[in-house]
Image (spheres, rainbow, N blue to C red):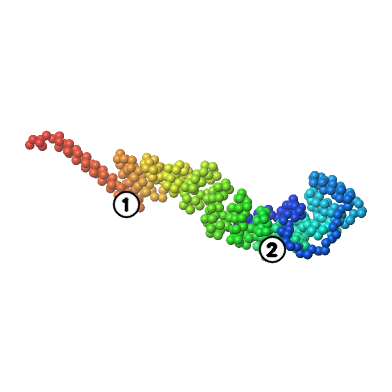
Amino acid sequence: MKNIFRKFIYIVLILSLAVPVSTIFEAITFNEVYAQKKERKKPPKARRTQTLSKKVATDFLKAQEALGEEKPDESLRILDRILSNQELSDFERATIYRLKGYVYAEKEDYQKSMDFLQQSLSYNALEPQAQLDLQFGISQLYLAIDQWNRGLKELLDWFDNAEALGNPPGPSAHALLAQIYLYFASESPKDSPEEKQFYRKAEPHAEIAVLQAAEPRENWYQIYLSVLLFDDRYEESIPLLEAMVYRFPDKKTYYRQLAALYAELKREEDSFAIQQIMYSKDMLEKHSELLRLAQLYLYYEIPYKAAIILERELEAERIEDEEKNWEQLANAWLSAREWKKAIPPLTKAAEMSEDGKLFLRLGQTYMQEEDWKNAEKFIRYAIKKGDLENPGRAWLLLGITRNKKGIEFENSALFAFKRSTGYEDMEADARRWVKVIETKQARREADRLAAEAAEAELADDTIYFN
Protein backbone atom coordinates (compact mmCIF):
# COMPACT_ATOMS: atom_id res chain seq x y z
CA MET A 1 0.00 0.00 0.00
CA LYS A 2 2.81 2.40 0.84
CA ASN A 3 4.29 1.79 -2.59
CA ILE A 4 1.03 2.96 -4.18
CA PHE A 5 1.15 6.22 -2.24
CA ARG A 6 4.88 6.69 -2.94
CA LYS A 7 4.16 6.33 -6.64
CA PHE A 8 1.53 9.05 -6.34
CA ILE A 9 4.00 11.34 -4.58
CA TYR A 10 6.55 11.00 -7.37
CA ILE A 11 3.90 11.61 -10.03
CA VAL A 12 2.87 14.78 -8.20
CA LEU A 13 6.49 15.90 -8.11
CA ILE A 14 6.91 15.39 -11.82
CA LEU A 15 3.70 17.24 -12.65
CA SER A 16 3.99 20.07 -10.19
CA LEU A 17 7.66 20.95 -10.49
CA ALA A 18 7.44 22.01 -14.10
CA VAL A 19 6.81 25.71 -13.48
CA PRO A 20 4.43 26.78 -16.25
CA VAL A 21 6.06 29.79 -17.85
CA SER A 22 2.70 31.02 -19.07
CA THR A 23 1.78 31.72 -15.45
CA ILE A 24 4.91 33.68 -14.56
CA PHE A 25 3.53 37.04 -15.53
CA GLU A 26 0.02 36.08 -14.57
CA ALA A 27 1.46 35.94 -11.06
CA ILE A 28 2.93 39.42 -11.50
CA THR A 29 -0.63 40.63 -11.97
CA PHE A 30 -1.07 39.71 -8.31
CA ASN A 31 -3.52 36.82 -8.73
CA GLU A 32 -3.39 35.39 -5.20
CA VAL A 33 0.28 36.36 -4.84
CA TYR A 34 -0.62 38.54 -1.89
CA ALA A 35 -2.95 37.66 0.93
CA GLN A 36 -6.25 39.41 1.44
CA LYS A 37 -5.50 42.97 2.35
CA LYS A 38 -5.08 43.38 6.07
CA GLU A 39 -4.37 46.55 7.91
CA ARG A 40 -1.01 47.51 6.53
CA LYS A 41 2.04 48.25 8.51
CA LYS A 42 3.38 51.74 8.16
CA PRO A 43 4.89 51.77 4.66
CA PRO A 44 8.31 53.11 3.82
CA LYS A 45 8.56 56.79 3.10
CA ALA A 46 6.63 57.31 -0.11
CA ARG A 47 8.36 58.43 -3.24
CA ARG A 48 6.95 61.39 -5.06
CA THR A 49 4.47 60.13 -7.64
CA GLN A 50 6.27 59.84 -10.95
CA THR A 51 4.90 59.75 -14.47
CA LEU A 52 6.18 59.35 -18.00
CA SER A 53 6.71 62.45 -20.07
CA LYS A 54 4.10 63.06 -22.74
CA LYS A 55 6.34 61.99 -25.65
CA VAL A 56 7.58 58.88 -23.82
CA ALA A 57 4.06 57.98 -22.71
CA THR A 58 2.77 58.18 -26.30
CA ASP A 59 5.46 55.86 -27.64
CA PHE A 60 5.23 53.59 -24.59
CA LEU A 61 1.50 53.13 -25.21
CA LYS A 62 2.28 52.13 -28.82
CA ALA A 63 4.76 49.54 -27.56
CA GLN A 64 2.13 48.13 -25.19
CA GLU A 65 -0.42 47.97 -27.99
CA ALA A 66 2.04 46.15 -30.25
CA LEU A 67 2.64 43.59 -27.52
CA GLY A 68 -1.12 43.19 -27.04
CA GLU A 69 -1.44 42.56 -30.78
CA GLU A 70 1.21 39.83 -30.52
CA LYS A 71 3.84 41.88 -32.33
CA PRO A 72 6.72 41.59 -29.85
CA ASP A 73 9.47 42.59 -32.29
CA GLU A 74 7.66 45.81 -33.17
CA SER A 75 7.18 46.48 -29.47
CA LEU A 76 10.93 46.06 -28.90
CA ARG A 77 11.79 48.44 -31.76
CA ILE A 78 9.60 51.13 -30.25
CA LEU A 79 11.10 50.61 -26.79
CA ASP A 80 14.67 50.73 -28.13
CA ARG A 81 13.83 53.96 -29.93
CA ILE A 82 12.59 55.44 -26.66
CA LEU A 83 15.75 54.30 -24.85
CA SER A 84 17.94 56.08 -27.40
CA ASN A 85 16.77 59.32 -25.84
CA GLN A 86 19.54 60.31 -23.42
CA GLU A 87 17.26 62.52 -21.33
CA LEU A 88 15.11 59.77 -19.82
CA SER A 89 14.55 59.75 -16.07
CA ASP A 90 15.37 56.73 -13.95
CA PHE A 91 11.65 56.09 -13.56
CA GLU A 92 11.16 56.11 -17.33
CA ARG A 93 14.09 53.79 -17.92
CA ALA A 94 12.89 51.41 -15.20
CA THR A 95 9.41 51.38 -16.72
CA ILE A 96 10.72 50.72 -20.23
CA TYR A 97 13.11 47.98 -19.12
CA ARG A 98 10.27 46.35 -17.25
CA LEU A 99 8.14 46.22 -20.39
CA LYS A 100 11.11 44.88 -22.36
CA GLY A 101 11.36 42.11 -19.81
CA TYR A 102 7.70 41.26 -20.38
CA VAL A 103 8.18 41.28 -24.16
CA TYR A 104 11.12 38.87 -23.99
CA ALA A 105 9.11 36.60 -21.72
CA GLU A 106 6.42 36.60 -24.40
CA LYS A 107 9.12 35.58 -26.89
CA GLU A 108 10.16 32.81 -24.46
CA ASP A 109 13.64 34.27 -24.10
CA TYR A 110 13.65 34.02 -20.33
CA GLN A 111 17.28 34.88 -19.74
CA LYS A 112 16.90 38.22 -21.52
CA SER A 113 13.58 38.75 -19.81
CA MET A 114 15.23 38.34 -16.44
CA ASP A 115 18.16 40.59 -17.39
CA PHE A 116 15.84 43.46 -18.29
CA LEU A 117 13.65 42.99 -15.23
CA GLN A 118 16.73 43.08 -13.01
CA GLN A 119 17.92 46.18 -14.82
CA SER A 120 14.54 47.77 -14.15
CA LEU A 121 14.77 46.76 -10.51
CA SER A 122 18.29 48.16 -10.16
CA TYR A 123 17.10 51.73 -10.71
CA ASN A 124 14.98 51.50 -7.54
CA ALA A 125 12.76 54.04 -9.21
CA LEU A 126 9.39 52.32 -9.29
CA GLU A 127 6.81 52.40 -6.54
CA PRO A 128 7.62 49.95 -3.70
CA GLN A 129 4.76 47.67 -4.70
CA ALA A 130 5.92 47.60 -8.33
CA GLN A 131 9.46 46.83 -7.18
CA LEU A 132 8.12 43.99 -5.08
CA ASP A 133 6.12 42.57 -7.99
CA LEU A 134 9.21 42.66 -10.19
CA GLN A 135 11.17 40.73 -7.60
CA PHE A 136 8.49 38.03 -7.55
CA GLY A 137 8.58 37.78 -11.34
CA ILE A 138 12.37 37.49 -11.32
CA SER A 139 12.23 34.64 -8.80
CA GLN A 140 9.89 32.75 -11.11
CA LEU A 141 12.10 33.37 -14.13
CA TYR A 142 15.01 31.78 -12.30
CA LEU A 143 12.85 28.70 -11.88
CA ALA A 144 11.91 28.77 -15.56
CA ILE A 145 15.59 28.55 -16.53
CA ASP A 146 16.24 25.83 -13.93
CA GLN A 147 18.21 27.99 -11.51
CA TRP A 148 16.35 26.64 -8.51
CA ASN A 149 18.76 27.78 -5.81
CA ARG A 150 18.72 31.35 -7.06
CA GLY A 151 14.96 31.21 -7.53
CA LEU A 152 14.51 30.04 -3.94
CA LYS A 153 16.74 32.81 -2.60
CA GLU A 154 14.89 35.48 -4.57
CA LEU A 155 11.52 34.16 -3.45
CA LEU A 156 12.52 34.04 0.22
CA ASP A 157 13.77 37.63 -0.06
CA TRP A 158 10.49 38.56 -1.68
CA PHE A 159 8.57 36.95 1.23
CA ASP A 160 10.51 39.13 3.68
CA ASN A 161 10.01 42.28 1.61
CA ALA A 162 6.30 41.60 1.13
CA GLU A 163 5.82 41.23 4.88
CA ALA A 164 7.78 44.41 5.49
CA LEU A 165 5.62 46.30 3.01
CA GLY A 166 2.47 45.10 4.72
CA ASN A 167 1.46 42.74 1.92
CA PRO A 168 1.71 39.22 3.38
CA PRO A 169 2.27 36.55 0.70
CA GLY A 170 -0.94 34.91 -0.44
CA PRO A 171 -1.85 31.33 -1.38
CA SER A 172 -0.23 31.40 -4.82
CA ALA A 173 3.13 32.48 -3.43
CA HIS A 174 3.00 29.89 -0.64
CA ALA A 175 2.14 27.20 -3.19
CA LEU A 176 5.14 28.22 -5.29
CA LEU A 177 7.48 28.07 -2.31
CA ALA A 178 6.12 24.63 -1.36
CA GLN A 179 6.72 23.55 -4.96
CA ILE A 180 10.34 24.65 -4.79
CA TYR A 181 10.93 22.76 -1.56
CA LEU A 182 9.45 19.64 -3.14
CA TYR A 183 11.84 20.06 -6.04
CA PHE A 184 14.78 20.03 -3.65
CA ALA A 185 13.25 17.02 -1.87
CA SER A 186 13.11 15.19 -5.20
CA GLU A 187 16.78 16.00 -5.82
CA SER A 188 17.82 14.65 -2.42
CA PRO A 189 18.75 10.99 -1.81
CA LYS A 190 15.67 8.90 -1.11
CA ASP A 191 14.80 8.60 2.61
CA SER A 192 17.67 10.92 3.50
CA PRO A 193 17.48 13.58 6.25
CA GLU A 194 17.71 16.20 3.50
CA GLU A 195 14.63 14.83 1.74
CA LYS A 196 12.65 14.84 4.98
CA GLN A 197 13.83 18.35 5.81
CA PHE A 198 12.54 19.76 2.52
CA TYR A 199 9.19 18.04 3.00
CA ARG A 200 8.97 19.62 6.45
CA LYS A 201 9.70 23.04 4.96
CA ALA A 202 7.10 22.54 2.23
CA GLU A 203 4.29 21.54 4.57
CA PRO A 204 3.28 24.87 6.17
CA HIS A 205 3.30 26.63 2.80
CA ALA A 206 1.27 23.88 1.12
CA GLU A 207 -1.22 24.02 3.98
CA ILE A 208 -1.59 27.80 3.74
CA ALA A 209 -2.06 27.59 -0.03
CA VAL A 210 -4.95 25.15 0.35
CA LEU A 211 -6.60 26.60 3.45
CA GLN A 212 -6.37 30.30 2.63
CA ALA A 213 -7.43 30.23 -1.01
CA ALA A 214 -11.11 30.61 -1.80
CA GLU A 215 -10.71 28.03 -4.56
CA PRO A 216 -7.33 26.29 -4.29
CA ARG A 217 -5.84 25.11 -7.55
CA GLU A 218 -5.65 21.42 -8.21
CA ASN A 219 -1.87 21.17 -8.04
CA TRP A 220 -1.90 22.91 -4.64
CA TYR A 221 -4.04 20.09 -3.29
CA GLN A 222 -1.66 17.60 -4.90
CA ILE A 223 1.37 19.20 -3.29
CA TYR A 224 -0.20 19.25 0.17
CA LEU A 225 -1.39 15.64 -0.22
CA SER A 226 2.06 14.45 -1.29
CA VAL A 227 3.54 16.06 1.84
CA LEU A 228 1.07 14.23 4.09
CA LEU A 229 1.47 10.91 2.31
CA PHE A 230 5.24 11.17 2.52
CA ASP A 231 4.91 10.78 6.30
CA ASP A 232 2.15 8.14 6.05
CA ARG A 233 -0.28 10.58 7.66
CA TYR A 234 -3.30 8.80 6.29
CA GLU A 235 -5.85 10.10 8.79
CA GLU A 236 -4.97 13.69 7.91
CA SER A 237 -4.99 12.87 4.21
CA ILE A 238 -8.59 11.63 4.25
CA PRO A 239 -10.34 15.05 4.61
CA LEU A 240 -8.03 16.52 1.99
CA LEU A 241 -8.79 13.76 -0.50
CA GLU A 242 -12.50 14.03 0.26
CA ALA A 243 -12.27 17.72 -0.63
CA MET A 244 -10.36 16.87 -3.82
CA VAL A 245 -13.03 14.37 -4.87
CA TYR A 246 -15.68 17.03 -4.27
CA ARG A 247 -13.76 19.76 -6.14
CA PHE A 248 -12.63 17.56 -9.02
CA PRO A 249 -15.39 14.95 -9.40
CA ASP A 250 -14.12 13.62 -12.73
CA LYS A 251 -10.58 12.78 -11.59
CA LYS A 252 -10.29 9.02 -11.19
CA THR A 253 -6.92 9.22 -9.42
CA TYR A 254 -8.38 10.92 -6.36
CA TYR A 255 -11.19 8.38 -5.98
CA ARG A 256 -8.64 5.57 -6.21
CA GLN A 257 -6.42 7.22 -3.61
CA LEU A 258 -9.38 7.79 -1.28
CA ALA A 259 -10.57 4.19 -1.64
CA ALA A 260 -7.03 2.95 -0.95
CA LEU A 261 -6.70 5.16 2.15
CA TYR A 262 -10.05 3.99 3.51
CA ALA A 263 -8.94 0.39 3.02
CA GLU A 264 -5.59 1.07 4.69
CA LEU A 265 -7.41 2.51 7.71
CA LYS A 266 -9.77 -0.51 7.87
CA ARG A 267 -12.72 1.56 6.68
CA GLU A 268 -13.69 -1.13 4.18
CA GLU A 269 -17.31 -0.06 3.78
CA ASP A 270 -16.24 3.49 2.92
CA SER A 271 -13.73 2.10 0.44
CA PHE A 272 -16.48 -0.05 -1.08
CA ALA A 273 -18.77 2.99 -1.35
CA ILE A 274 -16.12 4.94 -3.24
CA GLN A 275 -15.64 2.07 -5.68
CA GLN A 276 -19.39 1.97 -6.26
CA ILE A 277 -19.32 5.67 -7.12
CA MET A 278 -16.39 5.09 -9.45
CA TYR A 279 -18.32 2.38 -11.27
CA SER A 280 -21.36 4.63 -11.62
CA LYS A 281 -19.06 7.24 -13.22
CA ASP A 282 -17.51 4.63 -15.54
CA MET A 283 -14.12 5.13 -13.88
CA LEU A 284 -13.47 1.42 -13.44
CA GLU A 285 -12.16 0.06 -16.72
CA LYS A 286 -9.53 -2.53 -15.92
CA HIS A 287 -10.37 -6.21 -15.59
CA SER A 288 -8.90 -6.29 -12.08
CA GLU A 289 -10.88 -3.23 -10.90
CA LEU A 290 -14.20 -4.56 -12.18
CA LEU A 291 -13.57 -8.02 -10.77
CA ARG A 292 -12.62 -6.57 -7.39
CA LEU A 293 -15.85 -4.59 -7.23
CA ALA A 294 -17.93 -7.67 -8.03
CA GLN A 295 -16.06 -9.61 -5.34
CA LEU A 296 -16.81 -6.85 -2.84
CA TYR A 297 -20.51 -7.11 -3.61
CA LEU A 298 -20.27 -10.84 -2.94
CA TYR A 299 -18.34 -10.19 0.27
CA TYR A 300 -21.05 -7.80 1.47
CA GLU A 301 -23.69 -10.39 0.54
CA ILE A 302 -25.18 -8.49 -2.38
CA PRO A 303 -24.83 -11.29 -4.95
CA TYR A 304 -27.47 -9.99 -7.35
CA LYS A 305 -25.54 -6.75 -7.91
CA ALA A 306 -22.31 -8.71 -8.29
CA ALA A 307 -23.95 -10.88 -10.93
CA ILE A 308 -25.26 -7.85 -12.85
CA ILE A 309 -21.77 -6.33 -13.00
CA LEU A 310 -20.06 -9.59 -13.95
CA GLU A 311 -22.60 -10.35 -16.66
CA ARG A 312 -22.45 -6.84 -18.15
CA GLU A 313 -18.66 -6.64 -18.15
CA LEU A 314 -18.12 -10.17 -19.46
CA GLU A 315 -20.41 -9.36 -22.37
CA ALA A 316 -18.56 -6.05 -22.91
CA GLU A 317 -15.26 -8.00 -22.78
CA ARG A 318 -13.88 -5.70 -20.08
CA ILE A 319 -13.70 -8.75 -17.82
CA GLU A 320 -11.71 -11.50 -19.48
CA ASP A 321 -13.46 -14.44 -21.12
CA GLU A 322 -12.06 -17.07 -18.77
CA GLU A 323 -13.47 -20.13 -17.06
CA LYS A 324 -13.00 -18.73 -13.55
CA ASN A 325 -14.86 -15.51 -14.39
CA TRP A 326 -17.85 -17.32 -15.90
CA GLU A 327 -17.85 -19.58 -12.86
CA GLN A 328 -17.87 -16.56 -10.58
CA LEU A 329 -20.84 -15.14 -12.46
CA ALA A 330 -22.64 -18.46 -12.05
CA ASN A 331 -21.78 -18.47 -8.34
CA ALA A 332 -23.22 -14.98 -7.97
CA TRP A 333 -26.50 -16.00 -9.59
CA LEU A 334 -26.61 -19.15 -7.47
CA SER A 335 -26.01 -17.11 -4.31
CA ALA A 336 -28.88 -14.87 -5.39
CA ARG A 337 -30.97 -18.06 -5.83
CA GLU A 338 -31.42 -17.29 -9.51
CA TRP A 339 -30.98 -20.87 -10.67
CA LYS A 340 -32.02 -20.36 -14.28
CA LYS A 341 -29.72 -17.36 -14.73
CA ALA A 342 -26.82 -19.38 -13.38
CA ILE A 343 -27.13 -22.04 -16.08
CA PRO A 344 -25.70 -20.17 -19.15
CA PRO A 345 -22.50 -18.93 -17.44
CA LEU A 346 -22.03 -22.26 -15.68
CA THR A 347 -22.39 -24.02 -19.04
CA LYS A 348 -19.71 -21.76 -20.55
CA ALA A 349 -17.39 -22.35 -17.63
CA ALA A 350 -17.94 -26.12 -17.79
CA GLU A 351 -17.19 -26.19 -21.52
CA MET A 352 -13.89 -24.37 -20.88
CA SER A 353 -12.94 -26.64 -18.00
CA GLU A 354 -10.54 -29.55 -18.33
CA ASP A 355 -12.34 -31.67 -15.74
CA GLY A 356 -15.89 -32.62 -14.87
CA LYS A 357 -16.38 -30.56 -11.71
CA LEU A 358 -18.36 -27.77 -13.32
CA PHE A 359 -20.51 -30.19 -15.32
CA LEU A 360 -21.42 -31.78 -12.00
CA ARG A 361 -22.42 -28.37 -10.60
CA LEU A 362 -24.41 -27.72 -13.77
CA GLY A 363 -26.24 -30.98 -13.26
CA GLN A 364 -27.00 -30.00 -9.67
CA THR A 365 -28.34 -26.64 -10.84
CA TYR A 366 -30.73 -28.41 -13.20
CA MET A 367 -31.77 -30.55 -10.24
CA GLN A 368 -32.76 -27.32 -8.42
CA GLU A 369 -35.00 -26.57 -11.40
CA GLU A 370 -36.32 -30.17 -11.34
CA ASP A 371 -35.18 -30.57 -14.93
CA TRP A 372 -34.24 -34.22 -14.44
CA LYS A 373 -33.41 -34.88 -18.07
CA ASN A 374 -30.72 -32.19 -18.29
CA ALA A 375 -29.59 -32.94 -14.76
CA GLU A 376 -28.89 -36.56 -15.72
CA LYS A 377 -27.22 -35.49 -18.97
CA PHE A 378 -24.68 -33.16 -17.37
CA ILE A 379 -23.95 -35.40 -14.39
CA ARG A 380 -23.11 -38.15 -16.89
CA TYR A 381 -20.81 -35.66 -18.69
CA ALA A 382 -19.15 -34.91 -15.36
CA ILE A 383 -18.51 -38.58 -14.61
CA LYS A 384 -17.21 -39.19 -18.11
CA LYS A 385 -14.86 -36.18 -18.02
CA GLY A 386 -13.60 -37.26 -14.63
CA ASP A 387 -11.18 -35.74 -12.12
CA LEU A 388 -14.03 -35.19 -9.67
CA GLU A 389 -13.37 -34.47 -6.02
CA ASN A 390 -16.07 -36.95 -4.98
CA PRO A 391 -17.01 -39.35 -7.79
CA GLY A 392 -19.12 -41.42 -5.40
CA ARG A 393 -21.39 -38.43 -4.86
CA ALA A 394 -21.66 -37.93 -8.62
CA TRP A 395 -22.91 -41.51 -9.02
CA LEU A 396 -25.35 -40.96 -6.16
CA LEU A 397 -26.75 -37.81 -7.81
CA LEU A 398 -26.98 -39.63 -11.13
CA GLY A 399 -29.02 -42.32 -9.43
CA ILE A 400 -31.33 -39.72 -7.89
CA THR A 401 -31.96 -37.98 -11.24
CA ARG A 402 -32.71 -41.29 -12.97
CA ASN A 403 -35.00 -42.33 -10.16
CA LYS A 404 -36.85 -39.00 -10.50
CA LYS A 405 -37.35 -39.60 -14.23
CA GLY A 406 -39.73 -42.45 -13.56
CA ILE A 407 -40.16 -46.15 -13.03
CA GLU A 408 -38.74 -47.07 -16.42
CA PHE A 409 -35.36 -45.65 -15.32
CA GLU A 410 -35.31 -47.51 -12.01
CA ASN A 411 -32.84 -50.15 -13.10
CA SER A 412 -30.40 -47.58 -14.47
CA ALA A 413 -30.83 -45.64 -11.20
CA LEU A 414 -30.12 -48.81 -9.26
CA PHE A 415 -26.98 -49.32 -11.33
CA ALA A 416 -25.78 -45.79 -10.43
CA PHE A 417 -26.51 -46.27 -6.73
CA LYS A 418 -24.63 -49.55 -6.69
CA ARG A 419 -21.65 -47.83 -8.32
CA SER A 420 -21.82 -45.21 -5.57
CA THR A 421 -21.62 -47.90 -2.88
CA GLY A 422 -18.09 -48.57 -4.05
CA TYR A 423 -16.97 -45.27 -2.47
CA GLU A 424 -16.59 -45.39 1.27
CA ASP A 425 -17.88 -41.89 1.99
CA MET A 426 -21.05 -42.49 -0.07
CA GLU A 427 -21.62 -46.15 0.75
CA ALA A 428 -24.19 -45.67 3.51
CA ASP A 429 -26.34 -43.21 1.54
CA ALA A 430 -26.08 -45.25 -1.62
CA ARG A 431 -27.12 -48.46 0.16
CA ARG A 432 -30.19 -46.72 1.55
CA TRP A 433 -31.19 -45.77 -1.99
CA VAL A 434 -30.49 -49.28 -3.21
CA LYS A 435 -32.68 -50.63 -0.43
CA VAL A 436 -35.47 -48.18 -1.26
CA ILE A 437 -35.48 -49.15 -4.93
CA GLU A 438 -35.10 -52.88 -4.31
CA THR A 439 -37.88 -52.73 -1.71
CA LYS A 440 -40.14 -50.94 -4.19
CA GLN A 441 -39.25 -53.43 -6.88
CA ALA A 442 -39.81 -56.37 -4.50
CA ARG A 443 -43.17 -54.95 -3.46
CA ARG A 444 -44.19 -54.48 -7.05
CA GLU A 445 -43.03 -58.02 -7.85
CA ALA A 446 -45.01 -59.37 -4.90
CA ASP A 447 -48.03 -57.39 -6.01
CA ARG A 448 -47.61 -58.72 -9.52
CA LEU A 449 -47.37 -62.31 -8.33
CA ALA A 450 -50.37 -61.85 -6.06
CA ALA A 451 -52.36 -60.41 -8.92
CA GLU A 452 -51.39 -63.29 -11.19
CA ALA A 453 -52.37 -65.78 -8.50
CA ALA A 454 -55.71 -64.06 -8.08
CA GLU A 455 -56.37 -64.17 -11.78
CA ALA A 456 -55.41 -67.84 -11.91
CA GLU A 457 -57.74 -68.59 -9.03
CA LEU A 458 -60.61 -66.84 -10.74
CA ALA A 459 -59.96 -68.81 -13.88
CA ASP A 460 -60.09 -72.18 -12.03
CA ASP A 461 -63.84 -73.30 -11.94
CA THR A 462 -63.25 -76.32 -9.76
CA ILE A 463 -62.76 -74.32 -6.60
CA TYR A 464 -66.46 -73.36 -6.75
CA PHE A 465 -67.93 -76.77 -7.50
CA ASN A 466 -66.11 -79.20 -5.27
Is 158 on the left-hand or right-hand side of 252? right
Residue reaching furthest to the front = 39
Residue at the location (49% across, 48% down)?
306
How far is mark 2 from mark 1, CA to CA? 77 Å
Q: Are marks 2 and 1 in contact (CB under 8 Å)?
A: no
Q: Residue 380: which disc?
A: none
Of 456 and 121, which appears nearest the observer?
121
Relative to 140, is 5 on the left or the right? left
Residue type pointed to by label 2: Lys
The residue where tag 2 is placed is 201
Residue named by callout 1: 428
Other-residue count near label 2 (Cα within 10 Å), few / some / many at <14 / 14–19 / ≥20: some
Q: Is residue 289 visible?
A: no
Q: Is mark 1 on a helix, strand or loop?
A: helix
Disc with the residue nearer the chain's start (2 vs 1) = 2
Residue at the image point whose x is 47% and y is 50% from the top: 302
**Quarter of the image where the C terminus is located:** top left
